[in-house]
Amino acid sequence: MAEKALKRIDWLLVIFILPIIAAGLVTMKSFTPLESTADFFGKQIIWVLISFAVFFIFSFIDFRFLKRTEVLVFLFLFLSLLLFILIIIGHISHGHKSWFNFGFFSFQPVDTMKLVLVLILAKYFSRRHVEIRDIKHIFISGFYALVPLVLVLLQPDFGSAMIVMCIWFGMILVSGISKVHLFLVLTSGAMIFIMLWAFVFAPYQKARIYNFVNPLADIHGTGYNVFQSTIAVGSGQLTGKGLGFGTQSRLKFLPVPQSDFIFAAYSEEWGFIGSFLILILYCLVIWRILYLASLGASNFEILFGMGIAIFFMSHILINVGMNLGILPVTGIPLPFMSYGGSHLLTEFAGLGILMSMRRYVRTAHRDKMHNEFFGM
């Protein structure tokens, strides 16, 4: 049994992920002084080992029970309740209540909610693939995204809200929506943004968006983070300053270099070539996930795999974009590289479920579903 489970692991995907993890660990080690009590490197190694354990354990589990509506609804409601409780008693960090602090570790429930949102949308769209062009499904599926969206905005966590919207919008696109409906979705999104701007966004969130338009307008205030980040990335030039010589992170000009701005810290030390190689590895990870999605036994597995790819692409694009100064600073971690356990466990849990789904792929049925879904 164990041998069969190991055969279900896509080792090529693991090979692509390992150098990304190593890059994050090496970067954390390089800017953490020996006398520092903030041992990001040591703690992250523990989280990596735990996350890989979760990945392999999940690959052993038969996750067909996740196709049951009552299971997904329970998970969705339970995590929605946690997000609501978080608003009341959550630990305040960087201006918002996104964490339950248990002393020896912290837990961010929105990370798990992102994974559950992928599952519930995959379930919803897989049962309505034939009638997907009915516009009502856009609004019904939008309700599943609206609940966590509102709850995370009340924390307020603008970054996670962006990821929730990206997951919903991305899964609508891959579900087979018509171009007319796409236009309606975009129009609705613009209207929602206007309403959020007028009634929901806090002044500091508006300031971040203003800073997106002109990040150098207030480099000592709202533009400080992105200004220091762009300096770090630019100063790396072609080959970088070398391991341990990243002055922006070592001298603490670069904020939270172990998490939100780890890409900038890495780029300063490894330069354009190193950054390019990391982005190539991310592209290979996404390619492999999409390939595994195409082998799904049914629309549910295919949509789940594509949802996981959207999940990773959203995090990568937003994090790298804010590190380069072309997107607002939102506090989104970079997959596999940023410090922290909640997001890392969620990433490997999602991939573990994807591995598990390979256990019941039937070759003939798989090819039929692949051709039907991708039109090949």
Image (cartoon, rainbow, N blue to C red):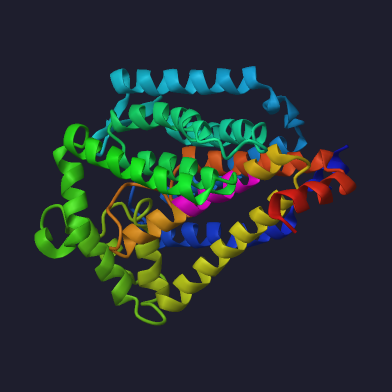
Q: Is residue 224 above or below residue 73?
A: below
Classified by dominant secondary structure, the portion drawn in magenta counts as helix
Which region is colored magenta?
305-314
Q: In the rendered structure, does residue 116 fall within the stretch colored magenta?
A: no
How far across and down, in percent of the image, does residue 80 sit? 44, 22
In the picture provided, is 329 more to the left or to the right than 369? left
Residue at position x 31%, y 51% from top?
256
Using the image as rendered, state which of residue 311 and residue 190 is in the foreground.
Answer: 190
Observer able to see residue 97: yes
Q: In the rendered structure, does residue 311 fall within the stretch colored magenta?
A: yes
Q: In the figure, residue 3 lies in which quadrant?
A: top right
In the picture provided, is 342 more to the left or to the right than 151? right
Using the image as rendered, state which of residue 61 and residue 327 is in the foreground.
Answer: 327
Residue at position x 83%, y 38% from top?
360
Q: Is residue 42 above or below residue 50?
A: below
How far across and down, in percent of the image, does residue 337 sit? 48, 55
Q: How many marks?
A: 0
Observer able to see residue 251: no
Q: In the figure, residue 124 lies in which quadrant?
A: top right
Q: Is residue 286 above or below residue 130?
A: below
* Furthest-bottom residue in this view: 238
Quadrant where the image shows the N terminus: top right
Using the image as rendered, state which of residue 254 and residue 315 is in the foreground.
Answer: 315
Quadrant where the image shows the C terminus: bottom right
Residue at position x 20%, y 40% from top?
197
Using the image as rendered, state which of residue 279 and residue 375 is in the foreground.
Answer: 375
In the picture provided, is 29 more to the left or to the right than 324? right
Residue at position x 21%, y 37% from top?
201
How far across and down, in percent of the image, does residue 336 sit? 52, 52
